């Protein structure tokens, strides 16, 4: 059983939290974010979606195909706010079969620097306390996403480690996964492999090609993920799951009639080296800012 911590009064990582994080690879902090804040983020995202013209950009995000990874719209999204569609939101004629707010897979990846509401949320003291309490010397928010996991069509995310996509030397990535709505086994909550961060290394590296125009995935370690040991990480609204870059996690498709909105913030340690062949590149005009 993965322990859960009541974090409604959170003011720092306790030794028990640190032990759980080191043993399991994931920390479950219930009540860290208020219901009011979840509603505020959801409303702000609604406004952003209303301002987006889906006819201009139709990039699909899929964890099972890599078509998106060659797409300039995706490759430049590390310093922008961009909108990615669900694979199953399109009909055979290539037209959306759902209204936009029910067709989006996610929005990313620089809301924490470009949008006032999401920036204030990402740069809160509690997140800094988490990152520092779990060993980061200079927490640097690198990437954020608003994930919709739409009713009926919210796609599967296959088992992976975030350190595949956000690489530092040494490995230093922390993912803060915030339940904006209740996440259950019915609507596609996260699953993880307790202790899986200690079994095998980082399996794959997702790299930007030398010419900068595409990406490729390099296999680093053939140790299989022990998926038979996966457990659901159900998260009521306001819960924050914290996991390191090596923690194997996944989520199944959402076939229920409830959405499962979540916000993720990935933070690296500014004292680690950030290789130039990471997919996510910031132009000099938008440097990363410490938490
Ligand atoms: Fe992930």
Image: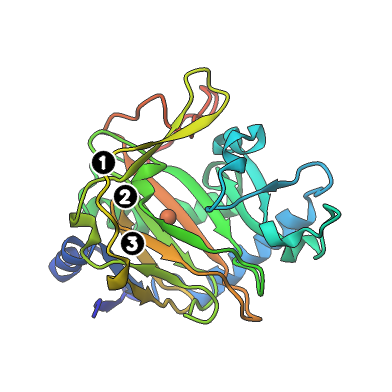
The secondary structure type at the circle numbered 3 is: strand
- Residues at marks 3 and 1 touching, judged by CB atoms closer than 8 Å: no
Work out whether residue 252 or residue 121 is closer to the camera in this orientation and state it.
Answer: 252
Is residue 223 at all visible to an observer of this figure?
yes
Ligand 1 placement by image quarter: bottom left
**Mark 2 or mark 1: whose residue is earlier in sequence:** 1
Q: State the CA–CA distance, disc 2 to disc 1.
A: 7 Å
The secondary structure type at the circle numbered 2 is: loop
Classify residue 273 as left or right of residue 262: left
Instruction: Assign the C terminus to one quadrant of the image.
Output: top left
**Residue with the mark numbered 1:** 171
Q: Residues within 10 Å of mark 1 (few under 14, many from 20)?
A: some
**Residue plotted at (50% across, 29% down):** 282
- Residues at marks 2 and 1 touching, judged by CB atoms closer than 8 Å: yes
**Residue with the mark numbered 2:** 245
- Residues at marks 2 and 3 touching, judged by CB atoms closer than 8 Å: no
**Residue with the mark numbered 3:** 242
The CB of the residue at mark 3 lies under 8 Å from ligand 1: no
The secondary structure type at the circle numbered 1 is: loop
Residue 150 percent location from the top left of the image: 64, 69
Residue 171 percent location from the top left of the image: 26, 41
**Residue plotted at (37% across, 76% down):** 232
Residue 251 percent location from the top left of the image: 46, 67
Residue 105: which quarter of the image? bottom right
97 w.r.t. 234: above or below: above
142 w.r.t. 6: above or below: above
25 w.r.t. 191: above or below: above
Q: Residues within 10 Å of mark 3 (few under 14, many from 20)?
A: many
Q: Which marked residue is nearer to the observer: mark 3 or mark 1?
A: 1
Residue 107 percent location from the top left of the image: 62, 52
Residue 277: which quarter of the image? top left
């Amino acid at each position: 059983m993965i322990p859960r911590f009541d974090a409604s009064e959170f003011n720092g990582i306790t030794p028990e939290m640190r032990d759980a994080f080191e043993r399991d690879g994931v920390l479950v902090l219930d009540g860290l974010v208020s219901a009011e804040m979840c509603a505020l983020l959801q409303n702000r995202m609604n406004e952003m979606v209303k301002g987006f013209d889906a006819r201009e950009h139709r990039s699909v995000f899929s964890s099972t195909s890599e078509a998106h990874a060659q797409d300039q719209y995706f490759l430049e999204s590390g310093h922008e706010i961009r909108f990615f569609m669900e694979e199953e939101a399109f009909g055979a004629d290539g037209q959306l079969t759902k209204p936009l707010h029910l067709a989006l897979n996610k929005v990313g990846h620089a809301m924490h620097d470009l949008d006032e509401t999401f920036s204030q949320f990402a740069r809160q003291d509690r997140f800094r306390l988490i990152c520092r309490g779990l060993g980061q010397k200079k927490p640097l928010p690198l990437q954020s996403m608003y994930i919709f996991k739409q009713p009926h069509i919210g796609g599967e995310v296959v088992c992976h480690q975030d350190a595949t996509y956000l690489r530092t030397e040494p490995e230093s990535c922390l993912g803060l996964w915030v339940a904006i709505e209740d996440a259950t086994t019915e609507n596609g909550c996260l699953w993880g492999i307790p202790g899986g961060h200690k079994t095998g290394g980082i399996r794959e590296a997702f790299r930007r090609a030398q010419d900068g125009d595409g990406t490729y995935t390099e296999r680093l370690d053939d140790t299989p993920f022990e998926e038979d040991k996966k457990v659901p990480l159900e998260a009521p609204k306001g819960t924050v799951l914290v996991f390191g870059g090596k923690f194997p996690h996944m989520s199944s498709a959402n076939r229920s009639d409830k959405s499962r909105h979540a916000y993720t913030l990935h933070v690296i340690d500014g004292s680690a080296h950030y290789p130039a062949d990471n997919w996510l590149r910031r132009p000099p005009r938008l440097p990363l800012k410490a938490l």
